[in-house]
Image (spheres, grey):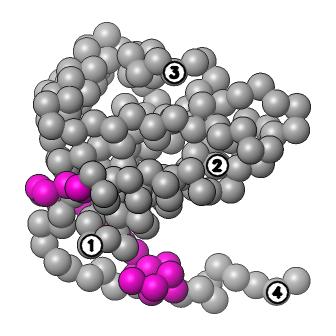
Amino acid sequence: MDALTLLQTRQSDPRLISPGPTEEQLSIIQRAAIKVPDHGCIAPWRFIVVEGEARHKLGEIYHQAAIEEQQDDRVIERAKELPLRAPMVIIAIADVKENPKVPRIEQVQSAGCAVLAMQQAAFAQGLGGIWRTGYFAQSPAVKHALGCKAEDEIVGYLYIGTPEVDIKKPIRHKPDTFFEKL
């Protein structure tokens, strides 16, 4: 897939099944992640690959966090199942570093760019993916369980697998709605 086609056709696929990425596909996804804009070359990211039985461990982390943080019953009930929605989940963490020239916001944005780059790399290889955030990206207990520092940010969970259905989504927005000339 050429770059322009990728940029104009990439979509999120919420229903993902096995197989997930092969080792070779994952290697390409990982290389894409670290080629994103990185002011000061400080690599302000960290990634945790979760697949197979480790998805149950992540579900348990979610479950315990939901209980500890007194979430409602629905959140607690669903917590263990969430990581099972795809064969692989990559947790993207903005590993914020003290740097007088690179503010925190730029470091978080760089980690966000890495998530998009990984999703695009997956899509370009015929895989599907969806970038999810929500409560468990903000949970202090989840951040602690994943070894985050206080200033770190979970920028997202990238779910990757084979799209269960092949539905091309229509373009929702028109560029001229968002672009203007000065």
Can you identify the residue that label 4 sits on? 181
The alpha-carbon separation of the residues under discs 4 and 1 comes to 36 Å
Image point (49%, 55%), residue name: 31
Image point (59%, 86%), residue name: 175
Q: In this rendering, is residue 146 above or below 20?
A: above
Instruction: Give the secondary structure at mark 1.
Output: loop
**Amino acid type shown at disc 3:** Cys
Labels 3 & 2 near each other (Cβ < 8 A): no
**Amino acid type shown at disc 2:** Gln
Q: In this rendering, is residue 116 above or below 108?
A: below
Q: Is residue 101 left or right of residue 143?
A: right
Residue 135 at what x, y percent from top left?
38, 33
Can you identify the residue that label 3 sits on? 148
Task: Give the residues in magenta.
Answer: 1-22
Residue 148 at what x, y percent from top left?
51, 21
Q: Which mark is residue 109?
A: 2
The alpha-carbon separation of the residues under discs 3 and 1 comes to 32 Å
Q: Earlier in the sequence, mark 1 or mark 2?
A: 2
Taking the magenta stretch, the answer to whether it contains residue 88 is no
Q: Earlier in the sequence, mark 3 or mark 2?
A: 2
**Amino acid type shown at disc 4:** Lys
Crowding at dot 3, Cα within 10 Å, few <14 / some 14-19 / many 20+, comes out as some
For the residue pair 41 and 62, the one nearer the viewer reads as 41
